[in-house]
Structures are given as C-alpha cells and as structure tokens.
Image (spheres, rainbow, N blue to C red):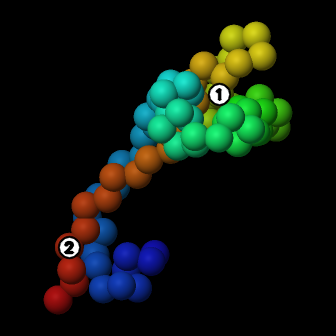
Amino acid sequence: EWLTEAGFSVEESHHFTKTMEFDPWVDAQVSDRRRRDRVERLLLDAPTDASELFQISTEGDRVRSFANLKVLIRAVRAE
C-alpha cells in the first residue's frame, strides 16, 4: 500500500523467513551484557504465538536461533 501511494506499481512479492543464529546476531547488535541478556529474556519469555511466528529455538535457558521475517518486492515506478 505504501509503495502504491509513493507512485510504484508492485509486480510481485515474496514472503520468507531467514533463520538467525542468536549469539552472532545479538553480539553484532548489542555490546552491553545487560542489554544482551534483556534481549534474550524477551525472546525466552515471548508469548506462544510470537514464539511460533518467529520460530524461536531454545536449548535449556538459552536462545539458539530465531526467524527474521522478510519480504522481497519487485516494483516499478508507475507512469
């Protein structure tokens, strides 16, 4: 919708997930240990529907991976 409003015509789109290993991802995003632990706790405590949607994988009390939702859009500027 926002692309159409910006003058584009969407020709196709594909939705997919990309599995992210938690440790390398969080280490690249957060340098503070307390923040890292908070991010992990948020994922561990996620409601069931969010855990399923983001495919949160755990091992004991650690997050192993999660799925990052993506969309690939091909659009052209409408003339």
Q: Which of 53 and 22 is in front in this view?
A: 22
Disc 1: which residue? 56
**Quick one: which residue is furthest to the front in this view?**
32
Q: What element carries label 1?
A: loop
Q: Which of 54 and 38 is in front in this view?
A: 38
Q: Nearer the viewer, residue 12 or 72?
A: 72
The amino acid type found where label 2 is placed reads: Val
Q: Residue at x 22, y 84 (%)?
A: 78
The amino acid type found where label 1 is placed reads: Ile
Question: How many angstroms separate mark 2 from mark 1 (CA)?
Answer: 35 Å
Image position, residue 21 (x, y; %):
50, 25
Image position, residue 37 (x, y; %):
73, 33
Image position, residue 18 (x, y; %):
44, 34
- For disc 2, the neighbor class at 10 Å (few under 14, some 14 to 19, many from 20) is few
Q: Is residue 79 found left or right of 25 in the rendered image?
A: left
Q: Which residue is drawn at 48% across and 27% down?
A: 24
Q: Is mark 2 on a helix, strand or loop?
A: strand
Tell me the tag on residue 76.
Answer: 2
